[in-house]
Image (cartoon, grey):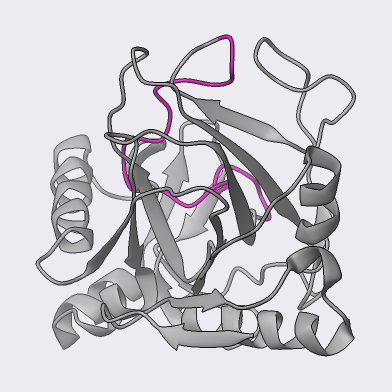
Amino acid sequence: MNITPLPVGFGAEIDGFDMREADDSMAEQLRAALLQYGMLVIRGQSFTPPEQIAASQLFGSLETFPTMRGQLNGLPEIFRVASRPEDGHVEVGRYWHSDGSFREDPTPISFWYSEVQSEEGGDTLFTDLQRAYAELQPEIQQEFAGLTTAHRNGVVHPLVLRHPKTEVPALYLNIGLTAGVLGYSPDHSRALMEAVDRHYSRDGATYRHHWLPGDVVVADNLHVAHKATPITPQTRRILNRTTIRADGVIWANGVQKQAA
């Protein structure tokens, strides 16, 4: 197993091993690397859907999803994202977000496998939430550390969320699903979210992943956020996503909603 840090300052690329054959030592290396780097780009894998489920379970117990058009019957653990509706969910996540942030205990880890690739379009962007907080001006850090956001479904989270394992604070905001900041007017909330959106996308802060055959990406959703880019139905692309439950994640304690 070869682990090479990505040049953007977070994330690491891993090659030279088959996740289907991971022993306890390899699994521990993967878990440690995910905690250290926030995101893993694992090359050269080849999964059937059940094999992806098994590989995902190296990081914990999986969430499940209802069967819908484009999803795999009998495999509720896999959430398919695609360019065509017959293949999966389309036009989702085209804003900065962490998967499952709408949950009381948000989804800690996401795992994507590239089943069908496109030559153009459909890249995924990633940004480091811990670095995003660290690079704020001290007075803005102090302001943000006291704020709470509300999702459209009523779920609330601190704007600055400490990682339950590492205790590192992160700027945690779902740009598309957040209704506003508690105690702020709609205009003030909108201005803050727009500022955070720009901050996530600032020069040098993002990693752009173009999906190749056999690619797996694993993201610690409490450390990094991601954003889909456009793709048209004329180009076929399928990503199979599995996600780890907060009560079954490798660090085992769920998410502690503790502000910085």
User: Magenta stretch?
Assistant: 86-105
Q: Residue 259: x percent and y percent?
A: 48, 75
Per the picture, the main secondary structure of the magenta-coloured stretch is: loop
Find residue 172 and report its image quarter.
Answer: bottom left
Q: Residue at x 54, y 64 (%)?
A: 43
The residue located at (62%, 78%) in the rendering is 16
**Residue occupying image coordinates x 85% and y 31%:** 75
* Figure label count: 0
Q: Quadrant of the C terminus?
A: bottom left
Residue 97 counted in the magenta span: yes
Q: Is residue 221 above or below residue 23?
A: above
Q: Nearer the viewer, residue 163 or 259?
A: 163
Where does residue 56 sit, x and y in percent of width and height?
76, 58
User: Which residue is the extreme one toward the left?
Assistant: 203
Q: Is residue 51 visible?
A: yes
Of 194 and 179, nearer the camera is 194
What x and y, as percent, mark residue 118?
38, 33
Does 211 lie within the magenta span? no
Where, by quadrant of the figure, is residue 78 drawn?
top right
Tell whether 233 sits left or right of 223. Answer: left
Q: Residue 247 in the image: state x and y as whole percent.
A: 82, 61
Residue 168 appears anywhere in the view: no
Q: Quadrant of the N terminus?
A: bottom right
Q: Is residue 157 left or right of residue 7?
A: right
Q: Residue at x 69, y 50 (%)?
A: 243
Quarter of image, res 166: bottom right
157 shown above or below 191: below
